[in-house]
Image (cartoon, grey):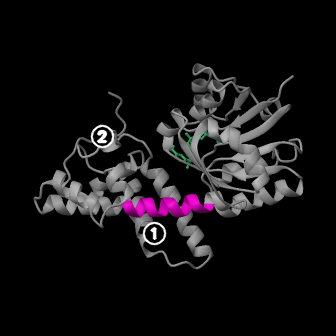
Amino acid sequence: MSKHIAFIGVGNMGNPMAQQLVNAGKQVKVFDVSEQAVKIAKETGLNVVNSLDELLPNSSTIISMLPEGKHVQELYLGENGILKKISQDSLIIECSTIDIETSLKIGDHAKSLGVKMIDAPVTGGVMGARVGKLNFLVGGSQEAVKLATPILKIMGQKILHAGEQGSGVGVKICNNMSLGISMIAASETLMLAKRLKMDLKKVHQIVKEASGNNWALTNYTPIPDLTDGVPSNNKYRPGFTAAMMKKDLKLANDAANAVNANTPLGKAALKIFTDFCEEGDADTDYSGISKKIGGDTWNYPFDPKGKD
Ligand code: NAD
């Protein structure tokens, strides 16, 4: 019997990632604790099993895509942790965005059991996952990364090896702190111009060509009708939610505190996104932060939970 890929956590990201593997002809079995995720997985043709005991035997690779560090810790090292159940020749690809400490703890444990593991969080979001164009930010030994690469290439376009285990989540956390800050900067720039009653199309075009440009301003513009295909054109439906940006900024803040790094803008961004979430906008795309920044001058179509 040929070995299969065991995919754990088929939510917004995991489901389309698992589908890419199936479409590429891989044998894939999936498991999730959520009834809703299981229902969608079955509807989308994935081979769902009912328990980890059913999932793990005869698997060559284990991929996990879970919400937070506590879920990942429980899965691998908890009371029924799977690390002690999987065979030594398995490869673990842990794709969740989690804290460095948890990633290192699981990586060390895996190493002590002779199991190869990489951390491989992603950028590119649900859209990237659906078309197999994620970017994987990878941490782990050369050997483990080489083994994982053919599988990652099915789900992604770039495989960016940052260093040893924990480096993938490390670079992801640093990147998303920069992204959160940049999204606020792009929002402030455009909302200041709006208050100054300037032509926003011209301001956007000029700043994109000038030294104030950043990725959020160009590629994920936080107000509508300036860039094609972004959530601000679609009533701020996610995309990548404000709650997720808050989570990543919190990870960055915790990481900074742990090593005494000075990140005043990271801290300010965390506070701004936390307030935004607490004001009822957690499910809005994170570019919706322009609403909070713009205040009473912000007047764009807004229906982040709608489906029309
Ligand atoms: P999600 O909540 O939609 O999916 C996570 C799934 O994991 C859920 O279906 C949940 O039931 C399942 N799960 C939790 N604990 C489990 C367990 N012990 N066993 C099996 N299944 C379990 O989240 P998502 O949007 O798919 O994000 C997953 C990860 O990817 C997060 O760490 C997130 O930060 C990161 N990420 C998300 C995006 C995005 O745009 N959604 C982009 C980049 C990175």
Residue 256 visible in image:
yes
Numbered disc 2: secondary structure = loop
Q: Please give the range of residues in magenta.
A: 170-182
User: What quarter of the picture does the N terminus occupy?
Assistant: top right
The quarter of the displayed image where residue 142 is located = bottom right
Front-lying residue, 36 or 47 = 47
In the displayed structure, does residue 235 sit left or right of residue 141? left
Magenta span contains residue 87 = no
The residue identified by callout 2 is: 228
Q: CA distance from mark 1 to mark 2?
A: 28 Å
Percent coordinates x, y for residue 148 in the rendering: 72, 44
Front-lying residue, 79 or 134 = 134
The quarter of the displayed image where residue 6 is located = top right
The residue identified by callout 1 is: 266
Question: Identity of the amino acid at label 1?
Answer: Gly
Front-lying residue, 144 or 46 = 144
Numbered disc 1: secondary structure = helix
